Structure formats: C-alpha cells, structure tokens
Amino acid sequence: MADQSTHALARACAEAMFGRDAASQGLGIELLEAGPGSARLGMTVRADMIQGHGTCHGGYLFALADSAFAFACNSYDEAAVALGCSIDYVAPARLGDRLQASASEQSRKGRTGNYDVRIENQQGELIALFHGKSYKVRGTVLSPETSND
C-alpha cells in the first residue's frame, strides 16, 4: 500500500508533466487525480472533435487514454515513454460528453510496465479500453534531461 509520501511524489510528477504538456492542455484535458501507478483525467467532447459519423474521433479518445497512461507510468519520478499501446473502442462518445480516463498499473518490473486505461462517459458507460506498455528511459520527471540522446 502506498504511503502519503508516494502519493505526494506521484501528484508532483503529474503536475510537473502536465505543466509541460501543451498537447493535453490544448485538448482541454484536465488532471483530476494522480497516485502511484495511477491517474484520472477528464475531457469534454467538443464540436471540433466530432468526425463524419457524428461521434468523437477515435484519435481524441486515444490521446485522452495515452495521456492518462503517461501520467500513471511517470508517477515514480522515473522517466518512462510508451513502448506500445492499443485501444478498443466499445461505444461512441458524443458531443458534450464528459469523459474520464482512469489509468491503473498492472505490472512494473525492471524497465517496463503495463497499464490499463478505462474511458467512461458521465453516466459511467464504458467508451474505450486502452493498454499501454511503458519503457523506463534516462532521467527523471521532476528534473527532466535537456539533451535529446
């Protein structure tokens, strides 16, 4: 069980990453919760996110889930990037829907981790299931590397 200091570290990492994350901010994504190996984000489906079938474009759902995954796998102040991701679209999200993406760590050992993300709408209906595999790289979240190597 995580103690108060690990929760504080996870929140600090999430806030630091979110402050540098122009992509998530530009989509209107909000950081709702962060904990060790977990994160919960929110996003409202806007008119510019609607595709030709009248529902939210899958790329926006993927971006929301990917952001939740990123905050969860970087919650230990050890920089991690995506090694691979997949998503299953279960139901459509519609204009005005308030979505929440909840990421949870399934495993973390060595340099890799596995994370699942559930996206649900405001009624708690499942919209998408995402799985991401992380890879630990050099550096930390709170003091990021400045080189591109």
Image (spheres, helix red, strand yellow):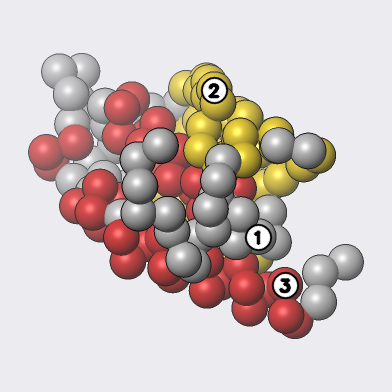
Residue appearing at x 68%, y 73% in the figure: 7
Report crowding for label 3: few under 14, some 14 to 19, many 20 or more residues within 10 A (C-alpha).
some
Q: In which quarter of the image is residue 84?
A: top right
Q: Earlier in the sequence, mark 2 or mark 1?
A: 1
Between the residue at mark 2 and the residue at mark 1, the CA separation in whole angstroms equals 20 Å
Location of residue 107 with respect to 146 vertically, above or below? above
Q: Name the residue under label 3.
A: 6
Between the residue at mark 3 and the residue at mark 1, the CA separation in whole angstroms equals 8 Å
Report crowding for label 1: few under 14, some 14 to 19, many 20 or more residues within 10 A (C-alpha).
many
Residue lying furthest left in this view? 48
Residue appearing at x 23%, y 41% in the figure: 95
Residue appearing at x 62%, y 73% in the figure: 9
Residue 78 appears at what percent x and percent y?
61, 54
Whether residue 13 sits left or right of residue 8 in the image: it is: left
The quadrant the N terminus occupies is: bottom right
Residue type (three-letter) at the residue carrying disc 3 = Thr
Residue type (three-letter) at the residue carrying disc 1 = Tyr
Exactly how many numbered labels are in the figure? 3
Q: Which of marks 3 and 1 is nearer the N terminus?
A: 3
Whether residue 144 sits left or right of residue 147 in the image: it is: right
Residue 116 appears at what percent x and percent y?
64, 36
Residue 86 appears at what percent x and percent y?
53, 21
| CB atoms of marks 3 and 1 within 8 Å | no
Q: Mark 2 points at which residue?
A: 84
The quadrant the C terminus occupies is: top left
Residue type (three-letter) at the residue carrying disc 2 = Gly
Q: Mark 1 points at which residue?
A: 76
Q: Which of 74 and 64 is in front in this view?
A: 74
| CB atoms of marks 3 and 2 within 8 Å | no
- Secondary structure type for disc 1: loop
